[in-house]
C-alpha cells in the first residue's frame, strides 16, 4: 500500500514544487534551472545509500521527498541572487547607455554567486549536522529514521556542489544567449 501511495505522492510533490516555483519566478527557464539541481542531489543520495548498504524503502522515499524540498530551496537562494546581480548589471548598463558584454555578465554572475556561498553552506552544514545524530542513533526506531536521514545527507553534499559550481555556469550560459539576441 505504501508503494502505491508513493506512485502518486512523489509526482504530486514535484508538481507542487513546480507550481510554487512558477508562482515565484514566472519563468520556465528558471524553473528548469532550479529543477536541474534535483538529479545531482538524487545521485548523491543513491551513492550514499549504496555505501551504507541501504535498500529502497518507504522511509528512504520520504527522505528523497524531503531532499527535494531542501535542494530546491538552496537553488532558489542561489538563483535569486544571480537574478539580482543580473538586473543590477542591466540597470547600470542602461544608465550608461551601453549594452552589457559577456565579461560584464560573467562578473555579475560571479559576484551574485559569491554572495551566496555562505548562506548555501550554512543551510547545507546545518542540515547535515542536524541529520547526522539521527542517522547514527541506535535506539528504538533508529533503523527507520536513519533511512530517512541518509538520502538527505548524501544528496545535500552533491547538491551543494551543483548549486555553487554548476548552477551559476548554467545561468551564465542562459543569460549569455539572451544578451546575444
Image: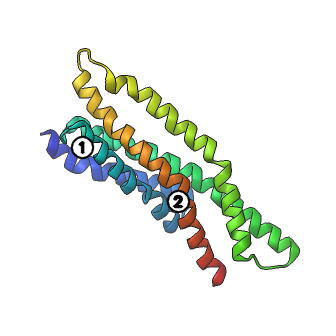
From this viewpoint, which residue is outermost toward the bottom? 181
Residue identified by numbered label 1: 50
Quadrant in the picture for the C terminus? bottom right
Judged by depth in the image, the label closer to the viewer, 2 or 1, is 1
Quadrant in the picture for the N terminus? top left
Within 10 Å of disc 2 (Cα), the crowding (few <14, some 14-19, many 20+) is many
At x 72%, y 64%, the residue is 107
Residue identified by numbered label 2: 167
The location of residue 88, given as percent across then percent down, is 76, 62
From this viewpoint, which residue is outermost toward the top? 139
The answer to whether 35 appears left or right of 10 in the picture is: right
The answer to whether 66 appears left or right of 101 in the picture is: left
At x 45%, y 42%, the residue is 70
Check contact, mark 2 vs mark 1: CB within 8 A.
Answer: no
At x 34%, y 50%, the residue is 42
From this viewpoint, which residue is outermost toward the right? 96
The answer to whether 179 appears left or right of 142 in the picture is: right
The location of residue 77, given as percent across then percent down, is 58, 49
Callout 1: SS: helix
Disc sitting over residue 87 in the figure: none
The location of residue 6, given as percent across then percent down, is 21, 45
Could you tell me how far apart the alpha carbons at marks 2 and 1 are, in whole angstroms? 26 Å
From this viewpoint, which residue is outermost toward the left? 1
Amino acid at each position: 500500500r505504501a508503494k502505491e501511495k508513493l506512485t502518486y505522492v512523489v509526482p504530486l510533490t514535484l508538481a507542487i514544487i513546480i507550481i510554487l516555483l512558477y508562482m515565484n519566478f514566472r519563468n520556465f527557464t528558471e524553473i528548469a534551472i532550479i529543477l536541474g539541481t534535483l538529479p545531482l542531489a538524487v545521485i548523491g543520495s543513491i551513492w550514499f545509500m549504496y555505501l551504507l548498504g541501504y535498500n529502497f524503502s518507504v522511509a528512504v522515499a520520504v527522505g528523497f521527498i524531503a531532499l527535494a524540498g531542501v535542494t530546491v530551496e538552496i537553488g532558489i537562494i542561489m538563483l535569486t541572487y544571480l537574478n539580482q546581480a543580473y538586473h543590477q548589471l542591466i540597470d547600470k548598463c542602461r544608465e550608461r547607455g551601453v549594452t552589457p558584454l559577456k565579461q560584464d555578465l560573467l562578473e555579475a554572475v560571479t559576484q551574485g554567486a559569491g554572495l551566496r556561498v555562505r548562506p548555501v553552506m550554512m543551510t547545507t552544514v546545518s542540515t547535515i549536522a542536524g541529520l547526522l545524530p539521527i542517522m547514527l542513533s541506535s535506539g528504538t526506531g533508529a533503523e527507520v529514521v536513519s533511512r530517512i536521514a541518509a538520502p538527505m545527507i548524501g544528496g545535500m553534499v552533491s547538491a551543494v556542489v551543483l548549486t555553487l559550481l554548476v548552477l551559476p555556469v548554467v545561468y551564465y550560459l542562459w543569460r549569455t544567449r539572451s544578451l546575444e539576441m
